[in-house]
Amino acid sequence: MSATPSSSRAQGSSIIRGSLISLGVRLLDLPSRYGFHLLVAAALGVVDTGRFYIVFSVMVALAGFGRLGMDQALTRQIAMDMASDRAAAVRPAIRRALCLVLAASAAVTALLAVGAAPFAHDVLRKNDLALPLALGALAIVPQNLGAALAGALAGLQRVGYSQMIYSWLWPTLFCVVAIGLKLAGLFTVTRALILIAASFALAALVGAILLKRALIAVPAATIDAHAPSPQPLLRPALSLFTLELTKLLITSAPAIVLGIVATDRETGLFALTWRMALVINLLISGVIGMAVPKFAELYARGNTQALEKNAAQAIGLVLCLALPAVACLLIFPERLLGLFGHGYDQGATTLRILALGQLAAACFTAMPEMLGMTAHMRALYKINACTLAVLLVGLAALAPLGGSAGAALATSLALAVNGAAAAWMAHRLLGVAPLARLWRDARGRLRPARRNGETP
């Protein structure tokens, strides 16, 4: 049954208010996450920064195989359960998800710890990275448990707490300790990796406490009686995992490939410029964090009109905020990179290419996530397979020739393909066209203003 016009207006306005709150919380990423990258870049220099980000990228990529998309599946399932008056299913779903994540993450941790030396020697050709890779494995279990807890919080509409656990709490904890290590002259690659693992562990603990408090508001009277049959989590999680895997590989594969085919210096330049371009992604992911549970709720209610309106508002909000940031990255790349230290300004071209890729991603904000939240898993799988093919073929062809700039071009092409393909499939399968809706709404707002300004 579709919503009434008044309810649609309420739902449409709620995503704007909620997204602004979500963005406000996410802006804490700027001092925390960028403080993290600034500390690493300033304390280690270009070459050691490259070594660090090779390990960090491997660690982040493998961590995704320990989550298997379970955090996003949990967000979707809890949001749908709450919208369908199935509150009794929430706690069992969380327990099953945490058990699956713990088992998978432990297996991935063991794999990285055992395979660190062979990977460093035979693939990276950098024997000195064997110990850092093994230390990086320590962060996988706490990182993934924290992500699962954050996914549960998002499904319960605790988006601010969810994003705190997902994004800014662990780098904040890292920076607090890392500043002291830097001042004492004790900041090294190995100590940084140990500190990352400890920061993830504390963030996961905070997430568990917040989730326990959030569950107090979930009705528990029917938990023992008339409990609904558990809904499958693993199958939708594996489908959503293709979306997560795509994001992980777009984030980490370029640095890993550059670590194999280029110098540590080129890897360091790309790593820093990519982190600077990700300021746009902070805006995108901040809005997505609010939109994703709303998409699942509206789809469960069958309200396609509100689904399109919410998606259009998400894209419009991100574009309004992203365009000034993109302009700064395109016009002043040398000055911005020079703030991180000597030699980084040589990545100006790389930063410009990555900024354009992030702008393309902003134009299709939350489109892949919409497919996942509306159960169009097969379409999402095809889109992600195509995106990964563009990314990996592009990296194989462009990274050896163009170094960091070539890797940036492959990354930006993959972002554009992913967003455009998802928007097309959403139009085909759901009948929604958020960009067209955004254009119509913008023209509708401008026309009255022009008429009011005309002389009689």
Image (spheres, rainbow, N blue to C red):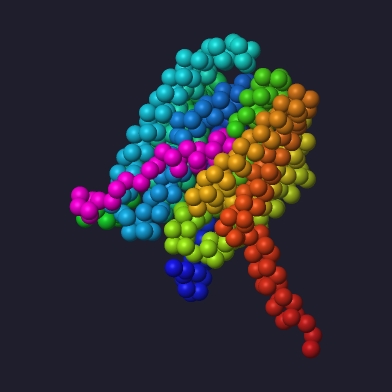
Residue placed furthest toward the bottom: 456
Question: Residue 385's spot in the image, x, y percent?
Answer: 61, 37
Q: Which stretch did the figure color magenta?
A: 222-248
Q: Residue at x 33, y 39 (%)?
A: 96
Examine the image and state in which quarter residue 45 appears: top right
Residue 96 visible, this orientation: yes
Question: Which residue is depicted at the point 20% across and 49% down?
Answer: 224
Which of the image's four quarters has the C terminus? Answer: bottom right
Q: Which is more toward the observer, 247 or 27?
A: 247
Q: Nearer the viewer, residue 256 or 440?
A: 440
Residue at image position (33%, 59%) is 85
- Does 299 appear above or below 212? below
Q: Residue furthest left?
A: 225
**Spot occupied by residue 16 in the image (x, y as percentages of width and height):** 54, 62
x, y percent for residue 451: 74, 80
**286 left or right of 87 in image:** right
Above or below residue 196? Residue 336 is below
